[in-house]
Image (spheres, rainbow, N blue to C red):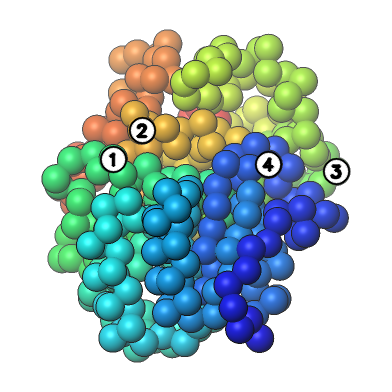
Amino acid sequence: MYSETHSLSIDRYRQGNNLFPVYQDQADQLNCIYIGQRETSLQHFATFFQSTSVTGSITDTILLIDKILAAKGAVPDVIVFDIPFCKEQLAGFFAFLKARPQVSAIPILYNEECLDKECLDCIKSNDMIDDVINMNKRGVNFANKVAFLKKIKNHPPAPLFRKETYAAIDSTKKTKSFTAKRLLDILISAAILVLALPVFILVALIIKLDSKGPVFYTSLRAGKGFKVFRFFKFRTMEVDADQKVEALSHLNKYGSNDKGAKFLKIYNDPRVTRVGKFLRKFSIDELPQLLNVLKGDMSIVGNRPLPIYEATTLTTNEFVERFMAPAGITGLWQVNKKKNPDMTAEERVNMDISYARQYNLMYDIRIMVKTPAALFQKSGA
């Protein structure tokens, strides 16, 4: 049990944990306040931050923040709750933060293990928490999540998004427009999956006969609110192709720009198999993404879900807004790429931002109508 406030060094938990070594520099810049008493929750989560101050209650946290402000110290970058939910105590804590401009925009996270359905509904309806997370989940970089939330809360892109921004980003409000969009996604994805079942079986057999390795390719992608999910495609490359990205970076169509957005697109990619070239030509490799749509990870129309190494380059103020829209199979830039095949990375991101600002059901339908090849992109995801 934690009876008093104390601070943990990142080195205590980082030793032996190399899940996300490429993000260490970003973690070295972030500080966290953890409210809870569970060593198991803290053990993995703390590796993403330079330091973690541990308190056992909201009262202790208020005292700690007042102490930091009085000493003009560095305010925390995020506050994480890992204690039983109490609406009244949270309301008082948020009033305390709101009255102090230095800490009023700190992202607030809650460990989902402490929340039942009633608590989750309360959080959604009252816009009380910025995100609900699983602190023990592997495959999620919490430093990136916090960086994204900080950009949004400190630099709200437009009044249109403020109300939604301060709500839990992973828990989009169930407006009529959202419900209609989700219903359309389910109907379209389910119908195509049923009709395309023979194609799935045939493609699986061809892939297995052509090269060694699994039928499906899966990778972690960042979608709306930087939510990370497992993304599905038919495998079109040799096994372990992701490990050769750095070696082929000099062939990248978009070049290298250390200060801006980074995308990877390699023409005549040597990693692509013989069958893979055919599948990509007719966008057949994209069919398994319908499983992501059915699960709710993606929508039929949205911004392209990005590999983590690309998404981490887009958390700056001018680019972060593109993550306010759902991830999608097709989208605005896919529809427009025929008009501008030499589109730059910045132009692509600007189109993503444009979609994020104005997407609705009718807008999605117009994009669907304009999208060739049954809504599937052809430029390699």
Mark 1 is on which residue type? Answer: His
Q: Quadrant location of the C terminus?
A: top right
The percent coordinates of residue 351 (x first, y second) are 30, 28
**How dense is the environment of label 3, judged by Cα within 10 Å: few (below 14), some, or many (20 and up)?**
few
**How dense is the environment of label 4, judged by Cα within 10 Å: few (below 14), some, or many (20 and up)?**
some
Q: Nearer the viewer, mark 1 or mark 3?
A: 1
Task: Identify the mark nearer the N-term, 1 or 4.
Answer: 4
Alpha carbon distance from label 4 to label 2: 21 Å
Which residue position is annotated with label 2?
317
**What's the mark number on residue 24?**
4
The percent coordinates of residue 361 (x first, y second) are 19, 51
Q: Secondary structure at mark 2?
A: loop
Is residue 255 shown above or below 369? Answer: above
Q: Residue at x 63, y 42 (%)?
A: 28
Q: Kindly indicate the quadrant of the structure image that contains residue 136.
A: bottom right
Q: Is residue 349 left or right of residue 43?
A: left
Q: Quadrant location of the N terminus?
A: bottom right
Alpha carbon distance from label 1 to label 4: 24 Å
Alpha carbon distance from label 3 to label 2: 43 Å
Task: Identify the mark nearer the N-term, 1 or 2.
Answer: 1
Alpha carbon distance from label 1 to label 2: 7 Å
